Amino acid sequence: MKNKRIPTILGTILLLTILFLGVWLSAKTTNTLSKASGDCAPISVQTTNLTNKSADISFLTTSSCSSILNINNQTISNFKTKTTTHYYRIDGLSASTQYQYKLIIDGQELSLSDYKFQTAPLPSGNLSMANLAWGKVILASGNPSPNSIVYLNVEGAWPLSALTDSNGQWHISLNNSFTEDKKSLFIPNSTGTEDIYVYSVDGQLTQVENDLSHNDPVPDIIVGLGFTPQLGTGA
C-alpha cells in the first residue's frame, strides 16, 4: 500500500483508524487521500461490490461535504444534504472494462490516476442460491444510524459493502459477488467467519467478527460498541 500524507487536522486517532481499514483492503481496493482542500479531502476511497456490470464507490470526509461522481458519461450525486459518508452505486457497465472516474467535492474536481477500476469478466457459472447478509446499525441510544457505510470482508471474495437506510438497515447479496481475483463468481461457505466494519456519520469505526451462519440476520451493531451484548461481543 502506498504511503499517504494525512493532514495534521485529522489527528492521531483518525490516522490510526484509516490505516486500519486501509490495511484490510490494501490488496483489493483503492485507498486514496486526495489533495482536496480542508476537511473535504476524500479518505479511504474504496471500490466494492464489483461485478461484470456494476460497482460501488465509497469514501469518507472529516467534515460534512457535498459530492458528485462522474463516470462513463454518468453524473451521480450522493445525498441532497452534505455528509461525511459518501456512497455511489454504478450500474450499466461493460464486462472486463477499465473505468476512470472523477470526484467533485464541494465544487472542487478531483481526477487522480488511481481513481479507476476494472470490471469482472462475464461469469461462466450460474448464480448460487440466494445468500443475503443483512442487519441493522444503531446508536448507543437505540436510535438507528442512517447513512453508515458497512464493509463486509469474507475470505476469498471481493470486498462487499452497503449503506444503511433511514432505519439503520442494510443488506448485502453474496450470491452475485465475485472472487477477489475477479475471475469467477464467489461461492459462499455456510461455515466460518466474516469481518464487518461500520463507518458512521460521526466518524466512528466499529468492527465486529460475525459467524457466516448468522447472516440472516446479522445481530444489531451498536456504533462504537459492537454487537448487542445479549447476541455477541463487540470488537
Image (cartoon, helix red, strand yellow):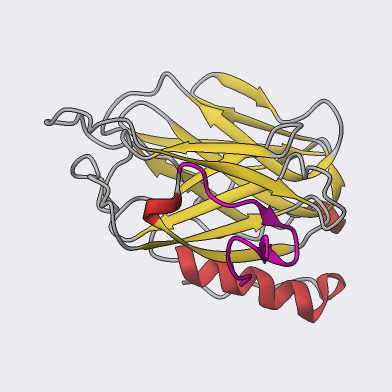
Q: Position of residue 42 (x, y in %)?
A: 70, 53
Up/down of 103 relative to 4, above or below: above
* Quarter of image, res 175: top left
- Residue 203 is a magenta residue: no
Q: Give 232 or 113, whichever is nearer the viewer.
A: 232
In the picture, measured across the screen, residue 150 lies left or right of residue 138, that is left
Q: Where does the image place residue 127, in percent across and percent down from the top left?
A: 22, 29
| Of the pair 227 and 32, the residue shown nearer to us | 227
Please indicate whether residue 82 sits to the left or right of residue 111 in the image. Answer: right
Question: What secondary structure is the stretch in magenta mostly built from?
Answer: loop
> Who is closer to the viewer here, 60 or 101?
60
The part of the chain drawn in magenta is 216-235
Q: Which residue is at 25% across, 31% downward?
A: 129
| Placement of 82 over or under 27, stated as above or below | above
Q: Position of residue 50 (x, y in %)?
A: 39, 39
Please indicate whether residue 215 sits to the left or right of residue 7 in the image: left
* Location of residue 160 in the rendering, given as x and y in whole percent from the top left corner: 45, 46
Residue 219: in magenta span? yes
Residue at x 49% of width, y 55% of height: 30
* Residue 43 in view of the camera: no
Seen from this angle, which residue lies furthest bottom? 12
| Quadrant hosting residue 192 | bottom left
Rendered residue at 74%/59% (across/down) = 223
